Image: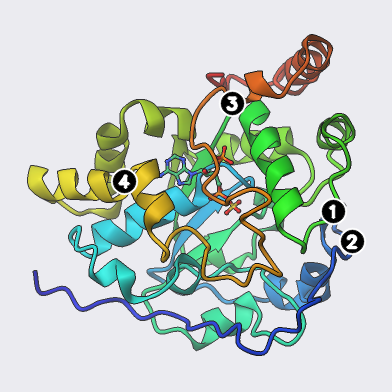
Amino acid sequence: MGTEPRKLCPVSWAHRPANMMNRPPLKVVSGMPILGPFAENWANVQRFQAREGDLLIDTYPKSGTTWISEIVDLILHNGDNKKTQRGAIYERVPFLEYAVPEMPTGTESLNAMESPRLIKSHLPVHLMPNSFWEKNCKVIYVARNPKDVLVSYYHFHRMAIVHPDPGTFEEYLQKFIEGKISYGSWGDHVKDWWKIRQQRNILYLFYEDMLEDPKCEIRKVMKFLGTDLSEDVLEKIHQSTTFKAMKENHMANYRTIPSTVMDHTISPFMRKGTCGDWKRHFTVAQNQLFDEYYEREMADTDLTFHF
Ligand code: PPS
């Protein structure tokens, strides 16, 4: 296939001090808690100029961002997994609100990047830079059931030192329910994107559907992107984006980030990749508490999840 590999934004970790960003406290921007260093760059995020043809991948954290990013990049390269080896996932799909001291911010990387760009974000609808709507950018949103999100996010806090210490699982569960974690309320996030999905250029997907019938969901993405690839290419994309394949793929599994920043020996980024791992974490009492929270959160929506 003759597709030119898309440009990427090289990120160098070469000069990172060993104690970089040791668990800085969260800050609140526009009512939402966010990683302290991200808050410092907030004005640049709000001023960010999206361009026509940008594709935004948005999720509440730990909902399948990396998975859908890899799928999209493969679709745009006709399933050629040599081309998707051109850089780490965070270089191919820069993270809009990313900011840590002494490194290029997400907005700087994206401003320097040639179009067409793939952009990752975890921002809720009401904090999206306006330019995405002005330019009518396509958005792929992925949602995941909150019990598995919580478990995945808890383990991610343990291994990634840009996050505050999660405390015990019990303490973390309480913080999640109260929305006192980076990106705030899970319920508001998934519901607000759900509400606007038909007014905007949004493909709303579910992690659990991607697990159950990956090819069907990849086909939906192809259609949304206006591509028509053969069954062989579809099969290749599917094989390259199984949990096992991505766990072994260093350009997708975040192993290129120094272990002082993400320590995969504490918990790997590609951890379980399943639906229902929460059952191994929640006690009966915690599950009851969480179900009550879920009922409250979802009382005003027709959005539902598989657990
Ligand atoms: S982040 O940090 O918010 O961008 O993380 P994100 O990529 O959204 O979510 C990480 C979880 O997605 C799982 N994952 C996958 N599951 C199934 N198949 C594939 N291919 C895949 N790739 C990533 C990853 O394992 C994290 O979930 P948990 O439950 O922790 O395993």
Give 213 or 172, whichever is nearer the viewer.
Answer: 172
Task: Kindly identify which residue carries mark 2.
Answer: 27
Please tell me whether mark 1 sits on a helix, a strand or a loop.
Answer: strand
Please tell me whether mark 3 sits on a helix, a strand or a loop.
Answer: helix
Task: Kindly identify which residue carries mark 3.
Answer: 277
Vertical arrangement, residue 207 with respect to residue 52, above or below: above
Say which label, 1 or 2, has the lower sequence index. Answer: 2
Q: Residues within 10 Å of mark 2 (few under 14, many from 20)?
A: some
For the residues carrying marks 2 and 4, which lies nearer the camera in this image?
Answer: 2
Instruction: Give yes or no for contact between labels 3 and 1 (Cβ–Cβ under 8 Å).
Output: no
Which amino acid, mark 3?
A: Asp
Real-space Cα distance between discs 4 and 1? 31 Å
**Residue 205's x, y, as percent?**
44, 37
Instruction: Give yes or no for contact between labels 1 and 2 (Cβ–Cβ under 8 Å).
Output: yes
**Left or right: 213 as drawn, with respect to 141:** left
For the residues carrying marks 3 and 4, which lies nearer the camera in this image?
Answer: 3
Please tell me whether mark 4 sits on a helix, a strand or a loop.
Answer: helix
For the residues carrying marks 2 and 3, which lies nearer the camera in this image?
Answer: 3
Say which label, 2 or 4, has the lower sequence index. Answer: 2
Task: Kindly identify which residue carries mark 1.
Answer: 33
Which amino acid, mark 1?
A: Pro
- The quarter of the picture where the C terminus appears is top right
Q: Residues within 10 Å of mark 3 (few under 14, many from 20)?
A: some
Say which label, 3 or 4, has the lower sequence index. Answer: 4
Determine the image quadrant of residue 70.
Answer: bottom left
Say which label, 3 or 1, has the lower sequence index. Answer: 1
**Residue 137's x, y, as percent?**
45, 61
Say which label, 2 or 3, has the lower sequence index. Answer: 2
Task: Kindly identify which residue carries mark 4.
Answer: 221
For the residues carrying marks 3 and 1, which lies nearer the camera in this image?
Answer: 3
- The quarter of the picture where the N terminus appears is bottom left
Real-space Cα distance between discs 1 and 2? 5 Å
